[in-house]
Image (spheres, grey):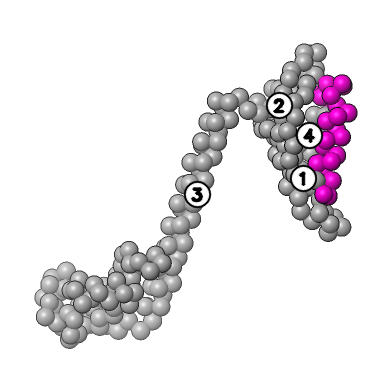
Amino acid sequence: FAPEIQKLLVDGQTVAIEDVRLHEMTRHRAGEFEAQGLRAFLAVPLRRGEAWVGTIMLGHGGPRGWNTEAGYIRVLAERVWLAYDNAHLVRDLLQREELLRIGVAVSGLGLAEIDYRSNMITLDQRAAQIFGVEAGVPMPRADVHARMHPEDRPFIMEQIDRLLHAEGRGFFGLDHRVERADGSVRWVAAQKQVIYGPGPDGARAAIRGFLA
């Protein structure tokens, strides 16, 4: 682009040339444009905040007006950036998910998700191995509580009840024993985070939980 056209684009202005032979910014270089098959063109700047980062351009081999296209291209430019941002967001989330997966695998951490509205819990492969239950299948919370050592269970249930109370603080961490179906006993260091939201009556209530 000629310097004067470049300046307009940098300043965020759309440039619509109906005929390169007639417009004052292009007539002195009309031959160069026509050599590229352009007799008319529309250039819409792409901006990120206050910065110009690129241009969307439409060209035509003959003279023509750009009365309606400019608005469409501006909308397209906005959608291009939205798609670009979304693509980067998805990429970042996938990278973080992969890092989390690697970290969990290296640490031997078991994870579980709890739905307090249905009173069900779903354990990942590692957590299921620890408790001796099936992985990836929602099951009643009571089935997991039953695996807690009888001597530890009353205290753990008391702490859970406090956590699930409407005024609960949302997090606890404690060590306890797990009694597996084969009679073996394992110690675990458990941490639970509870998410609160409106309950059936609209009051604050435990909605979801995450256990590690």
Check residue 189 in the rendering and tell me which mark sits there, or answer none: 2
Check residue 169 in the rendering and tell me which mark sits there, or answer none: 1
Check residue 139 in the rendering and tell me which mark sits there, or answer none: 4
Q: Label 4 sits on what residue type? A: Met
State the quadrant of the C terminus.
top right
Residue 18 image point, x, y percent: 25, 83
| Nearer the camera: disc 4 or disc 2 | 2
Disc on the earlier residue, 3 or 2: 3
Q: Secondary structure at mark 1?
A: loop
Residue named by callout 3: 90
Name the residue: 51% across, 36% down: 99
Q: Nearer the viewer, residue 143 or 61?
A: 143
Q: Label 1 sits on what residue type? A: Arg
Please tell me whether residue 155 belongs to the stretch shown in magenta: yes
Quadrant in the rendering for residue 113: top right
Q: Label 2 sits on what residue type? A: Ala
Name the residue: 80% across, 13% down: 183
Spatial separation of the CA atoms under disc 4 and disc 1: 25 Å
Q: Secondary structure at mark 4?
A: strand
Q: Which residues are magenta?
A: 146-167
Q: Nearer the viewer, residue 79 or 88?
A: 88
Q: Label 3 sits on what residue type? A: Val
